[in-house]
Amino acid sequence: MTESRTGVMLVDDHAEMRTHLADLLLNWGCEVTESGSDKLSLSPDHVPDVIICDRLCLKHVAELLQSTEAEAIKVIVLTDAQTRETSGPAFVAGYLGKPVKPAQLRALLQHLFVTA
């Protein structure tokens, strides 16, 4: 992705989805942490560059970002086919539909970190 390893936090209540995305991101050289929305927290030692979350977990992510004042973290929201958002809270950097297409995810990550 970039010169240094991109830190990614995956937030989804479906462990299978997290595992699938984690495998993909690890293959791309990212540093990955995973969480369900019920156990969401940030370690001061491992603040991610980006959070990829399911649309249903977005409220929890917003609360986390607000409580930690972590404005620099970019957020990518995954949506299902029936709810394809294109705009939302200002902290959301992009939306991708499920199932996630690896090429689209990689392109969005590259765009976010090349223009950052």
Image (cartoon, rainbow, N blue to C red):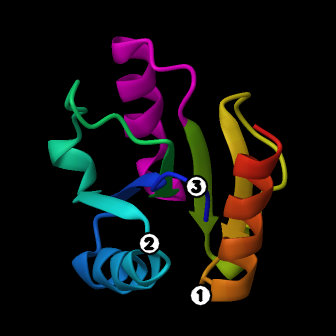
Q: Which residue is located at x 61 percent, y 81 percent?
A: 98
Q: Amino acid at mark 3?
A: Glu
Query: Can residue 33 be seen in this snapshot?
Result: yes
In the image: residue 75, left or right of residue 97: left
- Residue annotated with mark 3: 3
Q: Is residue 106 above or below residue 7?
A: below
Q: Main secondary structure of the magenta part?
A: helix
Residue ID for mark 2? 29
Front residue of 71/39: it is 71
Residue 18 higher or lower than 55, as above or below:
below
Which residue is labeled 1 in the image?
Answer: 99
**In front of the other: 94 or 2:** 2
Q: Element at badge 1?
A: loop
> Sequence order check: which comes first, mark 1 or mark 3?
3
Q: Nearer the viewer, residue 7 or 5?
A: 5
Q: Is residue 42 left or right of residue 104?
A: left
Residue neighbourhood size for the residue with mark 1, other residues' Cα within 10 Å, grouped as few (<14), some (14–19), many (≥20): few
Q: Residue at x 62, y 67 (%)?
A: 79
Tell me which numbered mark, 2 or 1, is placed earlier along the sequence: 2
Q: Position of residue 43 (x, y in %)?
A: 19, 31
Please, which residue is most extreme toward the left here?
39
Percent across and percent down for residue 34 are 25, 60
